[in-house]
Structure formats: structure tokens, C-alpha cells
Image (cartoon, rainbow, N blue to C red):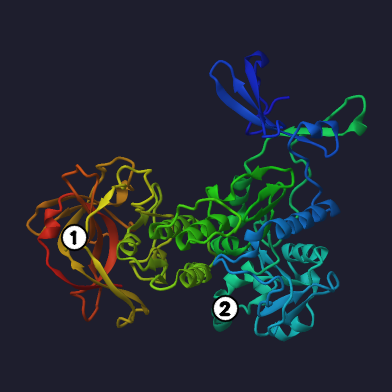
Amino acid sequence: MIFTETHEKISIDTEALLAYRCEDLNEKVESVWIYDTSTRDPLVKVYCHASEGSYASQHLVYRPISPPGSEMAISRIKCWIQGCIDNHPECLLAISGTALDNTPVLPTRILDVRDYPSSLRLVISDGRKAKYVALSHCWGGKPQLRTTKETLVNHQKHISCGELSETIRNAAWVTKKLDVCYLWVDCLCIIQEDEDDFDRESRRMASVYENSYVTIAATGARDGSGGLFLRSPQGTYVEVPCDAEDPKLGFMYFGLQKKPEETIFEAPLNRRGWVLQEHLFARRTLHFAPNQLYWECYKTFVGEDNTEVTNVADMAFPNRAFLCYVLDGLRGFHRNPKSEENNEMNNVADIYSIWAHLIRYYSTRGLTDPNDKLPAILSLSLELERILGHPFHFNEGLLFGSPYFELQGLLWRAEWGASLQRPAHRRAPSWSWASVDGAIDFVDLVHDNRSSYWFVDLWHPCKNDLKVLGVRAHQAPGMPSCKALLLNGTTLECFTTRCVTSRHDGQHNNNQLACVYTEKGDCIDGELEYDVADDRPDRVWLVPIFVRWRSEEASSPVYYCLMAKKAVDHPFKDRVFERVGVGMIFDVKWVFRCERGFLVLV
């Protein structure tokens, strides 16, 4: 048998192959690595499965998956849920650490699935308490049955199951099989095209997902027509009898697969922006992935075939366990009273760092409506603001509350290799990352040491550092309302030209770099880049933010700064600016020559 990562047949000299088996702590085989003996390069990792109860199951870790939507799959789901309820006290708590009610108050509207499949009914909860299931899914571009002002009354009487998408029908079936009466689905439980209802309900999303008995994630479906049951048993695995002479002794299966976390987070559902907060708040999630069913909670991430992530909080993607870990560390709270684990993440910097990490991830996700950029994380922002308490607060997607770290939040830029664009209609002030579309990165001076260019060690407060005075609602004549950032700091008027090379190769988008000159023609030594390609004014004002030293011995500090332009047609345009770029100045003498004053970023 020949296996390759592309599933293409190739010719390999079997004498040139070397195999190593990978075992778990119980000395059971989970996979076999095959190497090229001539180069010592790994060629492929073959995973080994065995039927439950077979002779091979005593020696192999993994099990074959059950048919989609089978009674065996439902039984496995019930075992996961009950095991979580019985053995995971951490999963009985909210992100804030407060105990969750076993029979929570139902969301404002909820689907009654007791008569499924003959019909469904939309119910107004009126504060009623009961268990319910929440659905996380991609709507996709195809038409989907929705609740509107016109259909609200009829949906409370009857919803024809034939009009529902395949995903919602499957979710209703699973909900009923789990002996739960109610299912929450956004397109049916929120009145669509009603701004007031959308605003109210979007603020409650954290509560909806956190209080759900379990969240069904249609992880593998690109739209509502995909459904939950996408996979086929064993997929590309090769079936081999444990005993060639007696097939009744069970079978073994050999094949290739991705890591569980890669399968989940590369799937269609997790490419959508709205799903981030749904995933972070759901305390129990059933991932109906393209290849199999996965279970995720605070303590466990496991697949039907027994593949498991041993430490959920250490996953490379944003997840509830890691968010709880950081928040608990800041507050000195132990989610499991019996745990002796020493949580060392107790610095305010961790909160800013994880928020930057979340936005990095979120900015790469898609949104059907670009105006949802901030609403899609509104509930998450409100909940974190409530948990953190005074003085922490969110404005336009940025976290405020610490004089130094809130300034650091202004240092967003395009992720290396990516480009940013401004949407056709302004949805956020220029100083917010939400004002642009594209993959965002932050200058995380505390935790991000991947780039020697951006990472420096020491912050030295200086009289020229920028100070945030507040955030205010702002309405300029002829312009949409937005939030204005009130500042006290220095500005330096400059002229720019495009620069085709970077001082630090590979750390910037070269087509966005700018050379900066004073009015007298002196070149200011630094590295500055425009936010977007089509907004590169010849005249800019540098707004220094703070100064840093690379080490104790460093004699040359750097000053991080914004590039800004005067706000067009503004009555107070001499002090009102719009952000156009970010970077740093190596020769800080130019900053020290500037005078402080009041300025506004809109």
C-alpha cells in the first residue's frame, strides 16, 4: 500500500523506507511515521484504527467513525454530554466564573422541535426556563427561510419543515434525539431586517451560546444546503481484516488525516466572522466536521475516532479554554477548586495581548455584510467589558483602560504579505482596525517576539508620549457620525514619497512604504507604511505615540508613531486628523523638537 499526502500513487523503493510507530502513554499504537532512509525526511504519517472489541483494538488507539446521523453517533454524543456534566466542574461556569443555571432562561424567541418532523413552531419565551440547543452555521448565498415582521405571527403558529435548509432540519432532528425541546437558530429567532431587534438580540449572543445545553456547529457546511451529515464512514481509509481467515474478528483501518484542530478551524464555518464569539461562548460544542464528529468543551477536544487534543488551552486557534485561562489568571480565580495548577498569567498585558490575538484571527474571517465588522463581536466586547470592570472599556474594537496598552492598540497594520482596503461606506473611525478590510496584525511589544524588527524590550515614559483624554461621539458637517479620539500629544508636519525597499527586508509591505521629509527637505530616519494603497497623501503629520529601547545597553531608542492627514472640510481642521499609516522613527530628535497640543483623530 502506498500513501501520500496528496493521495496520488507514486513509485517508492520499499527498501528505502523506514517506519516508526507512535504510541500513547498506554503503549497503544496511534500512527506510523514512514521516512525516506536516504534523506531521513518524513514522507507520511499513517493513522491506525481498529473496530471496538476486535483483537486489534487492544493495541491500537483509534476507532472507526460511525455512519452520519446513526443511533451510534447519537449515543456517543449523549455520552460526551453526560461525561462533561458529571466530570467537568469548569464547564458548569460562565467565562466570568459565575455558575450557570442547569435550566436557564430561554432566549427571547426559540424553536419548539417537539412536533418535528411534521412541523416546527416559533415560541416567545416570556422568561420561561428550559434546556435548549443553539445552532452555529453558515447561511451562505442561497435563499434561506427567515423570520421577518411579516412572517413573525405565522411562524408562531407553524413553520413547514420543507421550507427549512438542510442544516436546520438536521439540527432539529439532533436536538429532538437528545431529548431537548428547544432549538435556537439566528435566522429564525431574530427578526431579520429589523434594526432594533437585531441590536437587542446581537447584544445577547454571549448569553444565548453560553447558556445552551450544547451548541451544534455545522462546521463542514458552506451554506444551509450542506447539512450536518457530510462525512462518509472511513473516507479514504483502507480496510484490512484483523484475521484474514476470520473477518468476524473485526477490521483495522489505515489512512491519512489532519490534526483535529486543523480540520475544525480550516473548515467553512470557522472562516466566518460571526462564528468567533459563538465559538468562544459555547461551553459545549458538537462539531459536525467534513470528516467526522468532534466534541469540544473546556476540558476535552476529541473526535469520534478517539483523536484528542491533550491541552485545549494550548491550541493555536482562539478558544474558550484559553480565554478563560487568561481571565481567571488576571482575577486570581481557580475555575476548578480542586486544581493545584499555578496560573501565572496575571498581568494586565495578557488581556491586551489576547484581544490582539483575537482580532488578528477575526480580521481574516469573512462577513456577508461588511457593516457587521463591529456588530459581529459586539457581544464579546460587552461581556469582556463587564467581566473586567472599571476602567476597562471597548470603543470601536479597541480596548481602553491602561495608559500604555491602550496606545499599543493603535499600532495595528496589515499582516505581513497582506493588503488592506477601506470599505465603500465608512463604518468606523480611521484610528480603528475596523475601518479597513483585510488581515490585521498588531505590534504586540509584550508577547510577540517572532519579529526582531517590531519587538523591543523596554518602555520609557517620555514627556512627548501621546495621552488619551477620552473617546467622544463626533459628527462633522456632511460626514457620518463616528467616535473621535481626543488626544494630547505632538505632531510633526512632513512630506512623503514612495519607497521601494525596506530597511528590514520582509517585515513590511514594500509597496506601502514611505520616505518622510521635513519642510526643509531633511529626511527623517524611520520606517513608515500607509494603511491602504489608495490613500497616500503627499503631506502627512507624524503623531508620536511612545518611545522604546531595544535593550538596556541600546543607545538609540525608537519612537512609534501614526501617520495622519488633516480632516477634509472640517471646521477645526487644524487640530482634527485622520489616520493614514503607522510605523516608527529611529532618529527621535525630531520628536523632541515638537510642541504638545490638543488633537483629535476621527
Specify the quadrant of the image occupied by residue 89.
bottom right
Closer to us: mark 2 or mark 1? Answer: 1
Q: Is residue 250 above or below residue 276?
A: above
Residue 540 location, quadrant: bottom left
Q: For mark 2, give the secondary structure.
A: helix
Observer-nearest of 276 and 161 = 276
Neighbourhood count class around disc 1 (C-alpha, 10 Å): few under 14, some 14–19, many 20 upward = few
Q: Position of residue 8 (x, y in %)?
A: 66, 30
Q: Secondary structure at mark 1?
A: loop
Q: In this rendering, is residue 315 above or below 486?
A: above
Q: CA distance from mark 2 to mark 1?
A: 45 Å
Residue 462 - label: 1
Q: Position of residue 142 (x, y in %)?
A: 66, 65
Residue corresponding to mark 2: 198
**Which residue is the extreme one toward the top?**
15
Mark yes or no: residue 150 visible.
yes
